[in-house]
Image (cartoon, rainbow, N blue to C red):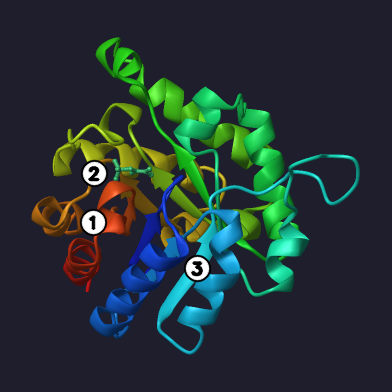
Amino acid sequence: MRSKLVAGNWKLNGSLAANEALLRSLIRNIPGNAAACAVCAPYPYLAQVRDLLRGTAIGWGSQDVSRHEQGAYTGEVSARMLVEFGCRYAIVGHSERRTLFGDTDSVVVEKYAAARASGLTPIFCIGETLEEREAGATEKVLERQVRALLAKTEAHEVAAGVIAYEPVWAIGTGKTATAVQAQEAHAFVRALVASKDGGMARDLRILYGGSVKASNAKELFAMPDVDGGLVGGASLVAEEFAAIWRAAT
Ligand code: PEP
């Protein structure tokens, strides 16, 4: 059966001092048992995160990864480099990467493949904008994003990753999808995956992301197809993030 995962996305935030205080508090408050927990930090801080989290129940990852293995790609970081020093997760296709940095569906799928080829667990983000939801196009958008992955990825490689449903209108806005809206989208995504492989769909973790807080996490995580959360702003506040994690346990 699927176990829950709560992953934090620090985005472009942090400093050596702030990260250390945050992580020390998380280590005290997240002893690890039923639900997995991870933080995804900016690249320069990954070594610090690795050192502080060694031997704890908290995993860690990056917020992106290159689709390239090596070569003349200035500014890129490859999956092999991340794995070399112990990274476990890599977020791919976050809506901020899609909208601000031009990551298309096919680029995101290439990043997913590069992550898997090196043994990383990709967290594959999907989600509709407000305009798309209001136009009744939510399922069409999710289908396009998920089918892009399914078309190029072996079933077992999809099951080895994580999907994060993050409605763009809920990210960083304080507007959370209702538990029912989240469940509808998650069930739809799981059904799409099941059309490729039923067993894989059953095992696949689908996280909800978008203004998750301690106050709404329990209701969201109680939904049958919501397997935890991808948490932005609240992951920078130790007590809040630990409370979200507890809501998943
Ligand atoms: C995110 O960045 O993935 C996210 C869900 O952000 P927030 O929790 O701040 O909405």
Residue 133 in the image, given as x and y percentages of width and height:
29, 19
Foreground residue, 160 or 14? 14
Would you say the beta carbon of the disc 1 residue lies within 8 angstroms of ligand 1? no
Q: Is residue 66 left or right of residue 37?
A: right
* Mark 2 burial class by Cα count in 10 Å: few <14, some 14-19, many 20+: many
Residue that badge 1 annotates: 224
Amino acid type, residue under disc 2 in the picture:
Gln
Tell which circle, 3 or 1, labels the residue nearer the N-terminal end. Answer: 3
Residue 116 in the image, given as x and y percentages of width and height:
69, 58
- Please say whether residue 3 is visible from this viewpoint: no
Foreground residue, 39 or 120? 39
> From what the image shows, is residue 92 above or below residue 130?
below
Q: Secondary structure at mark 3?
A: strand
Tell which circle, 1 or 2, labels the residue nearer the N-terminal end. Answer: 2
Task: Name the outermost residue toward the left.
Answer: 215
**Residue 183 — which label?**
2
Q: Is residue 7 left or right of residue 150?
A: left
Residue 103 in the image, given as x and y percentages of width and height:
61, 29
Tell me the quarter of the image containing the N terminus: bottom left
Residue that badge 3 annotates: 60
> From what the image shows, is residue 28 above or below residue 124?
below
Between the C-alphas of marks 3 and 1, the distance is 26 Å
Between the C-alphas of marks 1 and 2, the distance is 7 Å
Tell me which residue sits at (21%, 58%) in the image: 221
Q: Is residue 160 left or right of residue 236?
A: right
Q: Quadrant of ligand 1?
A: top left
Asked whether disc 1 touches disc 2, contact meaning CB atoms under 8 Å apart, the reply is yes
Asked whether disc 3 touches disc 1, contact meaning CB atoms under 8 Å apart, the reply is no
